[in-house]
Amino acid sequence: MNTISTGDKAYFCPTCGSSAIEASTLVGGAASCSSCQWSGLTTDLVVHVFKHDLGTSDDVVKAFAQEFKGLIGKHMATPLAALLHKWGFFVSNPPKSEELTRYAVAMAKASIIAILEVRREMEKERVRDGN
């Protein structure tokens, strides 16, 4: 299988170096840092260009989500099913695989959101503590 290396960009705050930025997709649009409260223009951001084999930014997110869901399915499906069954969360008796899948997907989505929120908080703490 041939992989195509794709160019991508990561943006960082010009004041503190944090990646916790909000930026307009417009060139010269507004940008701000949630770690140090810097605000300015997207053209002021520090840009790091890199290559990877994962496709578009959406493809990167999908690959992470798919790998995470696989982890949940491989290592947690059986104990999750036992827990949900014990506490009466299944509608069917015996439980249908679709019910477990629905819970597992919801758990994976919520976990990914929590991971990203924790990472953002860790970045704010790094800047605040001067590390």
Image (cartoon, grey):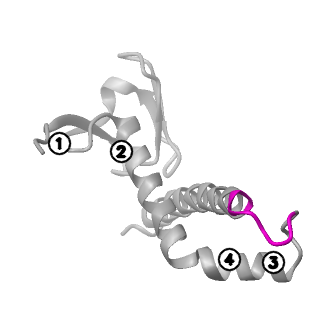
Left or right of 69? Residue 102 is: right
Amino acid marked by disc 4: Leu
In percent of width and height, residue 44 lies at 32, 29
Q: Nearer the viewer, mark 4 or mark 2?
A: 4
C-alpha separation, residue under disc 2 versus residue under disc 1: 13 Å
For marks 4 and 1 on the same chain, the one whose residue lies earlier in the sequence: 1
Q: What is the magenta range?
A: 92-99
C-alpha separation, residue under disc 4 versus residue under disc 3: 8 Å
In which quadrant of the rendered view does residue 88 lie? Answer: bottom right
Q: Which residue is mark 3?
A: 85
Q: In the rendered image, which quarter contains the C terminus?
A: bottom left
Residue at 81%, 72% in the rendered image: 94
Where residue 80 is drawn, which disc sits there? 4
For marks 2 and 3 on the same chain, the one whose residue lies earlier in the sequence: 2
Q: Secondary structure at mark 2?
A: helix
Q: Nearer the viewer, mark 4 or mark 3?
A: 3
